[in-house]
Image (cartoon, grey):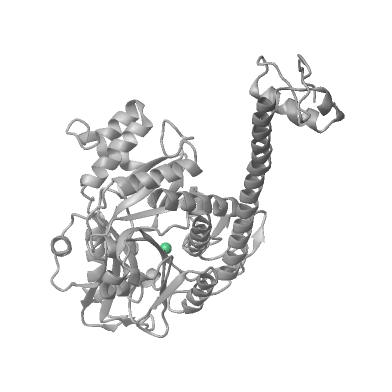
């Protein structure tokens, strides 16, 4: 290593030493010392004893740093690679366990075993033998520490059309860096990322006593209404869990959302949810032979009622959450379109707002009650029998401010037929929006670490998740999948070819690690 040293004088002292002039920088001195000391030149270059001693110390420090920094880096890379590999293997095994709602217990037993192997404290919650929910925590729940809860359901919807899948729905196949199978995104993949991230964060965290607990709460039955899952837990164990906040199912990160900035990655964090309301409309009327000329039948009455409901133009309604969302959205987008979005609820833009939202179904669903006819049912009978009863099922998603009783009253007025009976099949609790304060900011900053330049938007989630049960208890709850998604990936959820790229798994683990780091500060 060429170092231009000036040898000023030789002074005989008791050790061979080096002399550098004061014109040499610190780095030059250290490099010179290292270089010369390992060659025979050491005895020909001298300096004062004090300078040599000082330089020797710097040199040791320098060598230590050189050895330590890359070592740490390599260790981290190895750790991360191992964590990712472990996550892929775990997810493959988990996908292969058919955990369709009602038969999900083996999947929960699998994750319970993994959580125990990683050293977490676990606790079971179950009301029936066929269901299982459990918590995996750093500290026992009885420690009563405020608890940051990562919430995940492990039941999945069926995959009846398996012949249309490019890989069998419960194969867990890994091809071209993509993992395939029902539950990859909704929500087994998320559970695996959370577990690996929690272990990884804990391994690198200070060994001091933490003021908060972290709990992974794995639940059943989400796809069928959560009666034996989150609903059962929140009704029976709200105090045991000591929830400080909930991070659960919700929006992801998307590009091509802002009309003026298509490359901008925006994460949608749900701070509120619509209420789900499942209704049955039924009518009974005399049946008979199909050859009879009947003026009115159960089916004809029902069809008229359905068309009266379908004809109704939905009313746009902006609450505090959606007004905030549109303001943020307009600011992020900028320009004239941004201005229009920012002021979408002002009296100036009011006449145009239906037009603005017409081609944005996702934004439109944020400001209307949706009333979706999902099935029409008659008891099985041959084609020549007029049935004496007809039923129609509606999946309604109501804005948080909407009063359920009033909504049904309005629906009854719309139908305008006393023969139609309206029954509630199921409904989720009404909840208030969670605040966009410190927790929201911590999630935002952690996402920006994994995805530099990404922004977040607080949104009203158009569907209902298990978060609503905790939100109804007043626990701040945020719905976020910390993954960069696109429409074709989202369409696989509850559809065919559900999958997740391995890259997303790695990014998701990192994002959850940063999230825990930010929330545990
Ligand atoms: Zn889900």
Q: Nearer the viewer, residue 11 or 31?
A: 11
Q: Looking at the rendering, in which quadrant would you find the N terminus?
A: top right
Question: At x 67% / y 58%, what residue is drawn?
Answer: 175
- Residue 18 lies in what quarter of the image? top right
Residue 373 is left or right of residue 406, and the answer is: right
Q: Ligand 1 appears in which quadrant?
A: bottom left
- Residue 140 lies in what quarter of the image? bottom left
**Residue 379 location (% of width, % of height):** 34, 82
Residue 240 is left or right of residue 158, and the answer is: left
| Above or below: residue 521 compared with residue 431 | above
Q: Nearer the viewer, residue 415 or 260?
A: 260
Q: Is residue 149 visible?
A: no
Direction right: furthest residue = 40
Question: At x 66% / y 14%, what residue is drawn?
Answer: 23
**Residue 323 location (% of width, % of height):** 24, 41
**Residue 147 location (% of width, % of height):** 34, 62
Q: Is residue 338 visible?
A: yes
Count of marks placed on residues:
0
**Residue 273 location (% of width, % of height):** 29, 56
| Above or below: residue 71 compared with residue 55 | below
Question: At x 59% / y 64%, what residue is drawn?
Answer: 165
| Above or below: residue 333 compared with residue 10 | below
Q: Nearer the viewer, residue 9 or 476?
A: 9
| Above or below: residue 467 compared with residue 456 | below
Residue 38 is left or right of residue 259, and the answer is: right
């Amino acid at each position: 290593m060429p170092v231009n040293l000036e040898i000023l004088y030789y002074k005989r002292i008791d050790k061979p030493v080096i002399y550098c002039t004061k014109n040499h920088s610190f780095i030059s001195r250290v490099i010179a010392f290292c270089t010369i000391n390992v060659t025979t030149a050491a005895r020909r270059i001298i300096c004062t004893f004090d300078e040599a001693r000082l330089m020797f110390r710097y040199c040791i420090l320098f060598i230590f740093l050189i050895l330590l920094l890359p070592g740490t880096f390599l260790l981290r890379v190895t750790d991360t690679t191992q964590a990712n590999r472990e996550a892929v293997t775990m997810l493959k095994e988990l996908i292969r366990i058919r955990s369709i709602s009602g038969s999900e217990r083996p999947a929960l037993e699998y994750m319970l075993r993994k959580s125990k192997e990683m050293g977490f404290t676990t606790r079971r919650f179950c009301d029936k033998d066929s269901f299982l929910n459990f918590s995996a925590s750093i500290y026992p729940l009885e420690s009563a520490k405020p608890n940051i809860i990562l919430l995940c359901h492990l039941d999945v919807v069926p995959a009846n059309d398996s012949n249309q899948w490019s890989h069998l729905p419960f194969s867990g196949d890994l091809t071209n860096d993509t993992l395939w199978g029902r539950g990859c995104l909704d929500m087994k993949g998320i559970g695996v990322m959370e577990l690996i991230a929690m272990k990884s964060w804990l391994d690198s965290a200070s060994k001091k006593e933490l003021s908060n607990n972290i709990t992974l709460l794995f639940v059943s039955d989400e796809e069928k209404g959560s009666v034996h899952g989150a609903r059962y837990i929140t009704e029976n164990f709200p105090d045991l869990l000591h929830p400080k906040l909930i991070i659960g199912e919700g929006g992801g990160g998307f590009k091509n959302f802002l009309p003026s900035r298509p490359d901008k990655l925006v994460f949608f964090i749900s701070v509120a949810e619509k209420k789900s309301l499942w209704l049955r409309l039924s009518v009974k009327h005399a049946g008979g032979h199909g050859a009879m000329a009947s003026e009115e039948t159960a089916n004809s009455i029902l069809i008229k009622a359905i068309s009266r409901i379908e004809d109704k133009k939905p009313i746009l309604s902006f609450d505090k959450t959606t007004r905030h969302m549109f303001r943020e959205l307009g600011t992020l987008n900028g320009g004239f379109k941004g201005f229009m979005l920012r002021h979408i609820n002002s009296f100036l833009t009011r006449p145009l707002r239906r037009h603005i939202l017409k081609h944005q179904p996702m934004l439109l669903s944020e400001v209307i009650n949706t009333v979706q006819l999902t099935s029409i049912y008659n008891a099985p009978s041959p084609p020549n029998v007029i049935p004496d009863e007809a039923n129609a099922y509606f999946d309604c998603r109501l804005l948080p401010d909407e009063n359920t009783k009033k909504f049904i009253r309005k629906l009854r007025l719309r139908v305008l037929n006393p023969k139609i009976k309206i029954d509630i099949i199921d409904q989720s609790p009404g909840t208030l929006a969670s605040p966009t304060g410190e927790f929201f900011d911590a999630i935002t900053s952690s996402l920006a670490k994994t995805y530099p330049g990404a922004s977040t938007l607080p949104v009203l989630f158009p569907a209902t998740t298990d978060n609503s049960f905790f939100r109804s208890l007043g626990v701040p709850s945020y719905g976020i999948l910390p993954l960069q998604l696109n429409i074709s990936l989202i369409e696989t959820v509850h559809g065919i070819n559900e999958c997740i790229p391995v890259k997303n798994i790695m990014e998701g683990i990192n994002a959850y690690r940063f999230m825990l780091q930010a929330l545990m500060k």
